[in-house]
Image (cartoon, rainbow, N blue to C red):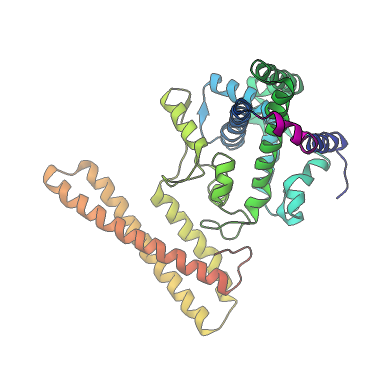
Amino acid sequence: MKIKNWGIFFFVVGYHVLVVALLPLFVVRFSWSALVLLVATYGIGGLSITAGYHRLFAHRTFKAHPAFEWVVLLGSTLAMQWSALAWSFDHRRHHAHVDTDADPYSIKKGFWYAHMGWLFSHRPDVEIKHVRDLHANPRVRFQHQHYLALTIAMNVAVVLIGCLFLHPFVAFYAGFLLRLFMIHHSTWFINSLAHVWGSKTFAKELSAVDNALLAFLTFGEGYHNYHHAFAGDYRNGIRWYHFDPTKWLIWSASRLGLAKELRSFQRIRLQRILVQKDKQLLLPLLHNHWDEMAAEMRARLEEFEHGFQQKADALVALLEELQSASAVKRQWVHLEVRRLKRELRSTWKAWLSLTSFIAKRYQLAHAHA
């Protein structure tokens, strides 16, 4: 890799050297107040990136009140990942060209390139035509134009606040150096590790994976395979037990009138899309093989897909009927809905087992168990 962006290179290498060199002194002076400062600033910076830069600006999965936008635009300066306009431009290119040479942080170019090496390569100028909606937002435009001044002011303010109850060195180390180190690597792991280590529940053809550990470190961003399959959803973790604080923050903001028009995929709709997508992906693969098992797998794919879609259609029809059903009929419809939901869950599990087996048996690119 040829280094072209020397300014960012020296900044990143420089603060890494300081983190390592000053760690012993920080350990000696450590206090629980330092941990509070670290966690608070890590949370503000990280959530501003995930809820603001990623799900609001880059993917437009919801609309936000100007006050919400100001909070994330200012809070994001603690993450030091450049302006919302520039970040969203890179991220939209990533989704449009994932796993190709046009992907700015493609995992195909190597783990460390995707992790941080891409930052040191030449950064193209932001092409407004790809972020025209954001450029029309005066708050986003103001942050882009004054990003360096805002970043310096916010980070100096954090350290000065820390000095009110901590030794200046500890406030600087915990409230700036260590926080920056943790936010950067957590974010970079989504570009690298979240395209290498994990499961592919949704889009088997992509390198993106779901990783619960990364979700914990990045406020829900670790469910990356789902995100690449359904980038328009304001959620990354769609199960109730998925750790996705960003989803909870956006939902809570909507209850307070700070966010609206949250976009999400209904479970039945999501599964129907995935079944159709898997079939379109796997059938051509199986048609390239003429062994007896491939023929059986083709038949089973057709059978399962047809059965799932029939049950899904029936369930949707029953749910619509439930809204206008009489009190007498409502109980029967409820029972039918529960029965169909059980059958769909069973069919969905069988579909996942079948498609995972085919992907492994016939070596589908990037397939994971």
Does residue 99 sit above or below 183 in this rendering? below
Q: Quadrant of residue 49?
A: top right
**Direction top: furthest residue:** 164
Q: Residue at x 49, y 37 (%)?
A: 247
Q: Residue at x 37, y 64 (%)?
A: 347
Residue 81 visible in the current orientation: no
- Is 358 inside the magenta-drawn segment? no
Total marks placed = 0
12 on left or right of 211: right
**Direction bottom: furthest residue:** 292
- Is 21 inside the magenta-drawn segment? yes
Does residue 162 sit above or below 105 in this rendering? above
Q: Nearer the viewer, residue 186 or 273?
A: 186
Q: Residue at x 28, y 47 (%)?
A: 319
Residue 292 visible in the current orientation: yes
Does residue 202 sit above or below 164 in this rendering? below
Q: Nearer the viewer, residue 246 or 172?
A: 172
Q: Position of residue 38 (x, y in %)?
A: 63, 30
Does residue 60 sit above or below 175 in this rendering? below
Q: Nearer the viewer, residue 23 or 12?
A: 23
Q: Nearer the viewer, residue 242 or 293?
A: 242
Q: Position of residue 206 (x, y in %)?
A: 61, 57
Q: Position of residue 145 (x, y in %)?
A: 74, 21
Work out which quarter of the rendered image holds the C terminus and state it: bottom right
- Give the magenta part as a residue range: 19-30
Chief SS of the magenta region:
helix
Q: Position of residue 353 (x, y in %)?
A: 46, 67
Q: Quadrant of residue 81?
A: top right
**Direction left: furthest residue:** 328
